[in-house]
Amino acid sequence: MKRLAIYCGSATPADPVYLDSAREVGATLAHRGIGVVYGGGRLGLMGAIADGALAAGGEVIGVIPQALVDAEVAHRGLTELHVVTGMHQRKQMFTDLSDGFVTIPGGTGTMDELWEALSWAQLGYHADPVGLLNTAGYYDELIAFWHKMGTVGFLRPQHRDLLIVADTLDVLLERMGAHVPTQPIVRMNASDL
């Protein structure tokens, strides 16, 4: 994996564990020679992950909609900053520039990005690993929900391993490196659906 799209929040939670973890994720990826592709912001966890990677000498590529540039939240010290017209173009560029996806804590925008990466993998629009870093148990309920979707039958058995989960980045990257693409929906027979 040469570059990973990192999905995370632009907010700064009161608990410093989230900001500290984001900086560490950026620094660790840089030390491993893995470039960061992210939302291009300077605030919250977004800014922390970019600053952590940049301080460690890493490549950081931001992809940000013009409306957010106009709101003056763009990070101006990145390796590259791509300004796009909207969110759909932004997410497509994340996919085009990256070899996988890592979600760290965030809010609704982060969830939108995670679910789209999973949905696209399930459909066969990409075959890249989709990782979830469960910092301080932040995603415990989401992980339980993922399992419930499988138990109830809304997630096919062959897609249950699409979400790669770990509590530490080292373990997550190891699991993502071992990722084997699954059979996408577009290659299934109607009787399998």
Image (spheres, helix red, strand yellow):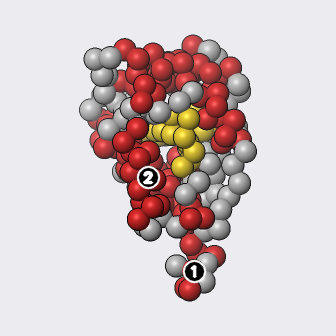
In the depicted view, which residue is nearer to us: 89 or 158? 158
Badge 2, how many Cα within 10 Å: few under 14, some, many 20+? some
Labelled pair 2, 1 in contact (Cβ < 8 Å): no
Tell me the residue that label 1 is attached to: 192
In percent of width and height, residue 47 lies at 42, 23
The residue located at (59%, 28%) in the rendering is: 169
Three-letter amino acid code at the position of disc 1: Asp
Crowding at mark 1 (Cα within 10 Å: few <14, some 14-19, many 20+): few
Q: Residue at x 63, y 76 (%)?
A: 187
Counting from the top left corner in percent of width and height, residue 6 is at 51, 36
Q: Quadrant of residue 34?
A: top right
Please state which amino acid type lies under the numbered disc 2. Trp
How many numbered badges does the structure rendering display?
Answer: 2
Name which residue lies at 65% across and 68% down: 183
User: At numbered mark 2, what does the secondary structure look like: helix, strand or loop?
Assistant: helix
Indicate which disc residue 164 carries: none
Q: Nearer the viewer, residue 42 or 1?
A: 1
Residue 127 falls in image quadrant: bottom right
Q: Is residue 188 above or below residue 169?
A: below
11 displayed left or right of 77:
left
Where does residue 114 sit, x and y in percent of width and height? Answer: 45, 48
Q: Which residue in the rendered view is the most extreme toward the front?
A: 151
Task: Residue at 43%, 25% (x, y): give it.
Answer: 136
Q: Which numbered disc flags the more N-terminal residue, 2 or 1?
A: 2
The answer to which quarter of the image holds residue 33 is top right
Q: Which residue is mark 2?
A: 146
User: Foreground: 3 or 111?
Assistant: 111
